[in-house]
Image: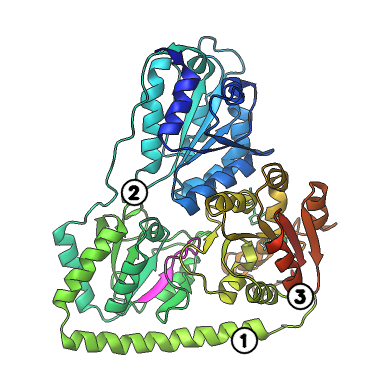
Amino acid sequence: MKRKGIDLFLAALKEYKIEHIFGNPGTSESAITNALASGDHDNFKYFLAVQEGVAMGMADGWARSSGKTAFVNLHIDSGLANGISLLINAYYGGAPMVLTAGNKDIRKLNSYRSNLVNMVKEFTKWSAEVTHIDQLPEMTMRAFKEATTPPTAPVFLSLAANVFDEYTDAPVIKLPFISKSTKPSIDSIELLSNKIINSDNPLILLGDRVSHSKSHQEIIEFAEKTGSWVYSATTSEINFPLDHPQYLGTFPNLLSKAQDKIKNHDLVISIGTNVFDGFFYMRGQLFNNDTFHAHIDSSASTIGRNEKTDLGIISDPKSALIDLNLELNKKMDGEIKEKISLRKKEIQIQTVAIKKEEKNTINENYNQNPMSAHRMFSEIFKSISNYIVIDDSVSSRQALLTANKFKPGEMHGERGGAIGWGMGATMGVKLANPDKNVIGIIGDGSAMMTVQALWTAANSNIPVIYIICNNQSYRVLKTNMQIYKSEILQESIQNDKYFAMDFNPPFNFAEIAKTFGLDGYKITNPDEIKKYLSLAVKSNKTTVLDINIDGTV
Ligand SMILES: Cc1ncc(C[n+]2csc(CCOP(=O)(O)OP(=O)(O)O)c2C)c(N)n1
Ligand SMILES: [Mg+2]
């Protein structure tokens, strides 16, 4: 039986369990929208985004929360260009995603036919153009295989217009089953377990590939067994319980401060993480020669990328942790266990002190006007349950993590650096969790970057709750300016002059929401948060709580 390329392609998407299409179409995607309008492909739900960043955010949120592969279709070079900003987040975060764009017919290289593959090469695991119908089944299969094989990442296919209109009798090619559990070698487990036994003060650095490999139980067991100090390299996923007595928080991303944390540790074990991604350049290496650095990761390319690494173990974190825990059980005698239990008490003294300091910060300025971010979050988490939070709150992130001790899967945070992610991501997470209260907590600058998301929330009827941290500024740019001046320029006197970082007039997201028929409330009094949040939970449409908070630095 012969069918058109587009019908083969949509049959492949169905075979690969794609149900949602996130996109914004153009004339080069006519074959797709024509086929979807025909009624023959009702198995897909198409989510129309009126700015490509929204489609990318939705896909990333969906992929991160569901663990499944997301599918996005954008329009040729221009639409793709708009999507690249948030493709960067999906790429650095390792979201399994297949991104496609229609391109012009391959038979005429006219002035407007550009090389879409070159446009996205830097931010995809694999990118290629399908120019002939006979390539379509193989390349579509390969795109999905690459996106879903660890380390997962976005993949791009450019689809020349002729491919979808030609006929073929080729069948869809099924995806291979590839086991995700790559086991570590026996000698590397032997070496690392001996290092652990002989260590006086091990430190563990965790990243999101711990969550990707679902090794939350194994990592707790490992940390407790080894009596290690535990830090997160980032807090974009909850890789370790935030209220655990050995958890010290997020690792600094300024080299001098990071070196300070490491200096008393003879052993550092990085697991499922990029090891150090300082924003400002500072000369030197994170580890000195007295620290043995071991790195366990499913992503071979992150091991020994730029920091000294003495032992690399290419393995999915779960398999390595299971093997290490078993090996340590065999090797630990009473004396070692005693040493470790004393060390855990020492760590706990630190974590108790950190918690006390956090409480003081929350209580400081509790009644100030405009309210502090801490106050806002303490009101929010007093009033809500059964939630998943999307954290795109930027400079309020620390206050959010202090206010609420999230469990794994309860919070997904921005990663990758492009602002505008959270507006779409909130809806993507809701699609994956229809029974949860899905709350996007978003900086006012970030929310404005993809404010078009509110239209999709109305059009596709996706009832989420947006909480806008309205500090009337790009506040984080001000706090980073302080770091730049003191740490990089070494200026001793600080001033509060900032350029292009304030919003005058301020944004009013409550009013913007109403223009799309959504509910919107402007909140200046913290005592009102509870009331409006419960209205939002009961409402079956998207609600925006636009909350004025303190923006001083
Ligand atoms: C697409 C993009 N443009 C610009 C930036 C630079 N940038 C980083 S954070 C930020 C400000 C975020 O402001 P807001 O969301 O209001 O959060 P706040 O800092 O006020 O907490 C900007 C402009 C960026 N990261 N990404
Ligand atoms: Mg702001």
Bounds of the magenta span? Answer: 229-240
User: How would you rate the neighbour count of disc 3 (Cα within 10 Å): few for under 14, some for 14-19, many for 20 or more?
Assistant: many
**Image height check: is 387 above or below 519?**
below
Q: Is residue 243 magenta?
A: no
Name the mark on residue 301: 2
Between discs 2 and 3, the one toward the N terminus: 2
Residue under pointer 1: 360
Badge 2 crowding class, 10 Å Cα cut-off, few under 14, some 14 to 19, many 20 or more, is few
Farthest-out residue, top: 107
Quadrant including the N terminus: top left
Query: Does the magenta run of residues contain 231?
Result: yes
Q: Residues within 10 Å of mark 1 (few under 14, many from 20)?
A: few
Image vertical order of residue 328 relative to residue 107, above or below: below
Of 492 and 288, the residue lying toward us: 288
Q: Foreground residue, 139 or 47?
A: 47
Q: CA distance from mark 3 to mark 1?
A: 19 Å
Coloration of the structure image: rainbow
